Image (cartoon, rainbow, N blue to C red):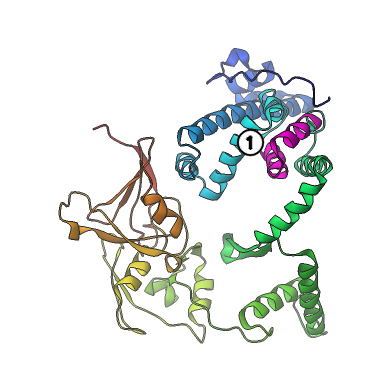
Amino acid sequence: MTPSQPVRKLVPATASQSDDELPFVLRSVRADPNTLRHMKDEQVVDVIRNSEAEISKLQALQLRAIADLSVRRRRAPSASSEVALALSITEHRAGAIVSAANALIARLPRMLNLMDDGRLDLYRAMKVTDATAWLSGDHVRVVDAILEDRVPGRNATQVRRAAAYAAAQTDPEGAALRTERKLVERRLTVHHQDAGVAHLSVNNAPTEKATAAYARVDQAARALKTPDEPRTLDQLRADVAIDLLLSGTGGPSERAEVFLHIDLATYLGLNQSPAALAGRGPIAATLARHIVSGPNTTLRRVLTDPRTGHAVELSPTRYPLDQDEFIRVRDQECRQPGCTRPAQSCGIEATRTKGAAEAGADQPVTFCSRHRKLKGQPGWDYEVTPDGTVSVATPAGQAHSTAPPSMHPGRRRANRLRKKPRR
C-alpha cells in the first residue's frame, strides 16, 4: 500500500444492528447463550473473534459521535467533561478518547476504516493516535497508509511499536523534537488501587537520570539485604524509594497529611467496617487502625447527623476551628460528579443554592481547579440543594448530581444520572 492510493470513502455506520446482520454464530449465541456449551472449541473461538469485530465496529460509530460532539462544542476541553459524565468514566480517560476520535476522523481515516471492518479495536487504534499525535498532517497521512496493512492481527504492543517506528522513519527531525517535548511534560503521578495500596511513578523523566535514580535505590536496597532481613529486594527497593522521597535520606519519613474517615466503633476494634481515605476510597479497617496508631497522627472528632451521616461539626483539637477546613472534611473530595481529587487539594467555591434568591445564600463547596473553571463555561450550570446535593447540568441538557458523602459505613451514595427536566 502506497501513500498515493485513495482512501475509501467514510460511510457512517448504522445506529443499530439487527440480528440478521450479525454472523450466524453470533446470532445463535445471542438467541440462546447456552448454545456455547454445545459448540466445538473452534466455534467458541469464532464467537470470541466475531464478537470482538462487532465491538470494534460499534466503537467506530461511538468515536464518530464523540468527534461530532467535540466539533459542536468547538473542540472546547469541556467536551471531555460531558463524555466523562455520559459514560461514567474519568475525565482523563474521556479526554484521551475525545482526542483519539478527533485524530481518527481528521488524520487517520484508514485506521478508522479498519475499525469499521472490525479489524482494529479502540485500544489498539489509540496506540496509533498516541504515537502519531506529534506528526504534521502530511506526515501522518503517510504513516496512516503505511500502517494500513501492518496493524491488523497485531497486538497492542506490536501496533505501538509499528506506529512509533513508522512515525520516526517518516519525520526523523520531528522525532528528536518530540523527545524534548516529552521532557517538558515530565510529571509525578499516583494511582490508588484496591487493598489500600497505590502506584507512584515519575513519567517522562530523562532516561539517564531515571537509570541513575534506580541504581541508587537498588544499591541502598542491596546494602540492607542482610541474612536477617525478611524483605525481598523488590520490597526493599520500594521502601527505600518512598523513604528517600519523604525524608531525602532514606531514613525516617517526614510527616505527611492525609484525611482518614473512620467511625468510633471501627477505631476501637468493635467492628471491621472499612474506613475511607480521601481521594482514594475505602480501605480495610486493620490498615485504618494502623494509620491512626502512628506517632504523628492527630485525631479530630467529627459530629455527624445520625440520619444521613453528613458531617455537621468539626472539633478544634489541633487548630482554631476554621470554616474552610470543616468544608474540606465534610466534602472529602471534589464535589463534581465522578471526581475523586482529595478535598485538601481543592478550593472552596461559593455555589448557587437552589430556590434561594438572595446572594448571601450561596453555599461553599469544594471543587478542584479543573472543575472550578468548568463552572464558568457556557452551558454548564451548578446549584446546591439545601441538603448539600450538588446538581450539574451539561450543555447537552443532561443533569448529574452528587450527594454529600456520609461518614457512616454503608451509607455512601453513588453519583446518579438523570435527564434534565424540560422547562
Q: Pick the residue in front: 411 or 214.
A: 214
Q: Pick the residue in front: 306 or 94.
A: 94
Verify whether residue 135 appears in magenta: yes
Rendering coords of residue 54 (x, y %): 64, 25
Q: Circle 1 sits on which residue?
A: 103
Write down the quadrant of residue 237 in the picture: bottom right
Q: Secondary structure at mark 1?
A: helix
Most common secondary structure along the magenta stretch? helix
The magenta stretch is 123-146
Q: Going by the image, does 205 lie left or right of 417?
A: right
Q: Going by the image, does 228 lie left or right of 415?
A: right
Q: Residue at x 70, y 56 (%)?
A: 182
Q: Amino acid at mark 1?
A: Ala
Height in image: 13 above or below 389? above
Verify whether residue 139 appears in magenta: yes
Rendering coords of residue 98 (x, y %): 56, 39
What crowding class fits label 1: few (fewer than 14 Cα within 10 Å), some (14-19), or many (20 or more)?
A: many
Q: Going by the image, does 276 lie left or right of 411?
A: right
Q: Going by the image, does 256 lie left or right of 208?
A: left
Write down the quadrant of residue 116 in the picture: top right
Q: Residue at x 70, y 72 (%)?
A: 238
Write down the quadrant of residue 321 in the picture: bottom left
Query: Which quadrant of the figure contains the N terminus?
Result: top right
Rendering coords of residue 45 (x, y %): 75, 29
Q: Pick the residue in front: 405 or 186.
A: 186
Q: Residue at x 38, y 46 (%)?
A: 377
